[in-house]
Image: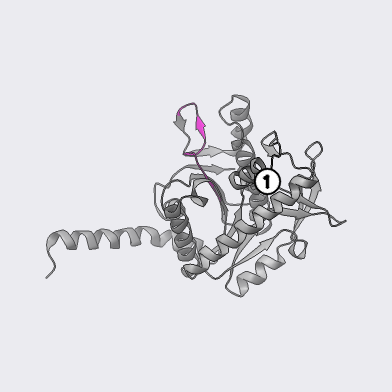
Amino acid sequence: MLPKRIMKKKIKKAEILIEALPYIKRFYGKYVVIKYGGAAMVDEGLKDSFALDCTLLRFVGIKPVIVHGGGPEINKLMKKVGREIRFVDGLRYTDKEDMEYVEMVLCRINSDIVSLLNKHSARAIGLSGVDSSMIQALPIEGTGFVGDVAKINTEPIKLLDEADFVPVIAPIGVDREGRRYNINADIVASKIAAALSSEKLIILTDTKGICDGERLLSTLKSERIESLIEKGCITGGMIPKARAVAEAVSVGVSKAHIIDGRISHSILLELFTDEGIGTQVVI
């Protein structure tokens, strides 16, 4: 017979699995759109944690769709080549030459994420919004080649899902004339989640979530987002994230979450535990 100390550990593991069971049943066969970014894309341990989380989701019958950004890497390249880095309302200003660098970086990041997921048997395939005009774009005035999402063509995503692949999507859109646009990855994730009628939208960040002053808001109604922006509680790059989750729940995504990607296995902690982490945004 096993010693009591070891037996208690094994029972604790079983209890964790039992706690996860109702959530696995609830989310089985449903889409979960995950915006991957921040420290979780840089730290080697967190990268493996993210890949394992996505692999587990797929193997228990949940459908992860990954949308990634690349801000820090784009900044690094822009500084290296002597390009000015500008932001307008939290969105990167992108002229024609900048767009070439943005695409270069996003393409490499996309390939790295696909390779990482495949190492853990997730069966991932990389896409850009240009593929099959998946992300149809409109320009945002005053931002150069920065776009907004006009429409999402979900057919490529659904075809990959039917073939048991995990889509990994770079946020580059295309207009009717074939011009390409840099689109904020949080916005793309929100639009894809809405188009797929996803059960969840999860945005990984380098913060605990949305705070009202020093206090973390574990649950937040979407109607409060704009007032928190006006109060200065939500600033900079968190503005498009907050607006993205608010829009997602307003058009049918069941729940949206902004969580701390600096925590190992943050996706599983949010989806499969009673407490969850970060901020849950609801209608």
In percent of the image, x 45 and y 65: which residue is there? 56
Under circle 1, the secondary element is loop
**Outermost residue, front side:** 81
The front one of 105 and 65 is 105
Q: Looking at the image, can residue 234 be seen?
A: yes
In percent of the image, x 52 and y 68: which residue is there? 118
Q: Residue 52 at what x, y percent from top left?
A: 45, 62
From the viewer's perspective, tell me whether residue 275 is left or right of residue 138: left
* Residue type, mark 1 in image: Asn
If the image is split into quadrants, where does the N terminus sit? bottom left
- Is residue 210 on the magenta stretch? yes
If the image is split into quadrants, where does the C terminus sit? top right
Where is mark 1, residue-wise? 184
Q: How is the image coloured?
A: one colour
Q: Residue 34 at what x, y percent from top left?
A: 56, 54
Q: Residue 157 at what x, y percent from top left?
A: 66, 65
In percent of the image, x 23 and y 61: which residue is there? 11
User: Magenta segment range?
Assistant: 202-214
In percent of the image, x 65 and y 54: which residue is there? 106
For residue 165, above or below residue 237: below
